[in-house]
Amino acid sequence: MSDILPPKVGISRCLLGAEVRYDGTGAKSSIPHAKLTGLFDYVDVCPEVAIGMTVPRKPIRIVRDVDVIKVVGSVEDTPDFAPELRQHAGEVVAQNADLCGFVFMHNSPSCGSRNVKVYPTKGGPGVREGQGAFAASVIQRWPELPFEDAGRLFDDILRENFVTRVYAYAEWQKMASELSAKSIIAFHSRYKYLLMAHNMVVYKEAGRLLADLSGSGLQEIATKYIGLLMGGLREVATRGGHANVLAHIQGYFKKSLSSAARQELAQLIDAYRVGEQPLLVPIALLKHHLRENPNAYVAMQTYLDPHPQTAALRRSL
């Protein structure tokens, strides 16, 4: 993992404990803070308060009026708040170009990023098929930005995946300030095995995209590449994906390891593949062999350390 400062991550303000929800409470328990300590520099946002809603206030909900999504009062008639929430999203995006991710309050009609209840205008039960107006606008304006609903971060695998994406995007932003064909190739060389573990199809597509950078349009290619990378990393890596990458990396040591050492490593990779060992076990052995048999190309692979080791995010993978 490259030495970068904790990335800036947007977050729904209530998730930090601020009492800004409609009922005057906070929602600090809705995010596993202890698991994320020190990983991010938070930039907190409460779109409802930002557009002038009071604390406390009447609750709101999403309704579908034919093909139009509105955000209105759930217990009394109100104007549609969706346009103001979307406008505020544009302001947040414009003012925070250095964000590397966003944690949204789940189930919120303003901040929920997935499976938010949408109600019919004429009454009836809601269906979990929508996004909060603010969150949807942020995602639409900034499609490559890693995001996650807070509640999903209690899941070990989803949490590790989100942190991986945030740190990848942070390193891209740092590199992109001095964009060149050489810097893009160097970046992809570091991230290729991480991408391979998550999505082999996108890995191959990214390779084809970067096959020829000799012409013009470098910025356009860079934009397509980061979109591919973040989209590919969004898919959770499977045991099979990890095992495939571990086997590829093992290949770099075939001439430097004894037959017994190669067999031991292969057996650990297979044990991980079938769920008998955690991911850290074969990775630890690979790192041991790397220290004993230095290889510059393997050593630079982000796959081995995609985020700070102190977070112990791979312990349960």
Image (spheres, grey):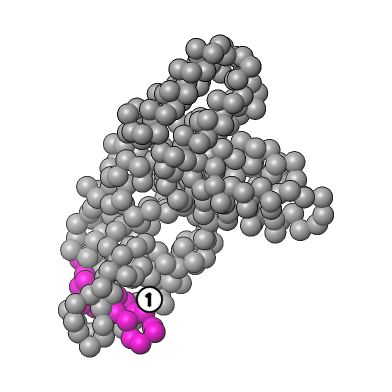
Residue count near mark 1 (Cα–Cα under 10 Å), binned few <14, some 14–19, many ≥20 = many
Quadrant assignment, res 107: bottom left
Q: Residue at x 39, y 83 (%)?
A: 68
Q: Residue 247: give x, y in percent of width and height.
A: 52, 30
**Element type at marker 1?**
helix
60 in the magenta segment: yes
Position above or below: 174 against 52: above
Quadrant assignment, res 122: bottom left
Residue situated in front as seen by the camera: 203 or 19:
203
User: In the rendered structure, which amino acid carries the disc numbered 1?
Assistant: Ala
Judge from the rendering whether residue 78 lies leftward or rightward of residue 136; answer left or right.
Answer: left
Q: In which quadrant is the C terminus drawn? A: top left
Position above or below: 217 against 299: below
Judge from the rendering whether residue 95 lies leftward or rightward of residue 61; answer left or right.
Answer: right
Residue situated in front as seen by the camera: 62 or 77:
62
Is residue 16 shown to the viewer in this render? no
133 in the magenta segment: no
Q: Residue at x 45, y 31 (%)?
A: 308
- Residue range in magenta is 56-74
Q: Residue 236: give x, y in percent of width and height.
A: 42, 47
The prevailing secondary structure element of the residues shown in magenta is strand
Q: Which residue is mark 1?
A: 82
Q: Residue at x 26, y 82 (%)?
A: 120
Residue situated in front as seen by the camera: 48 or 138:
138
Q: Residue at x 43, y 23 (%)?
A: 267
Judge from the rendering whether residue 143 lies leftward or rightward of residue 69; answer left or right.
Answer: right
Q: Residue 111: give x, y in percent of width and height.
A: 34, 63
Q: Residue 307: give x, y in percent of width and height.
A: 47, 34
Is residue 198 shown to the viewer in this render? yes
Judge from the rendering whether residue 170 lies leftward or rightward of residue 125; answer left or right.
Answer: right
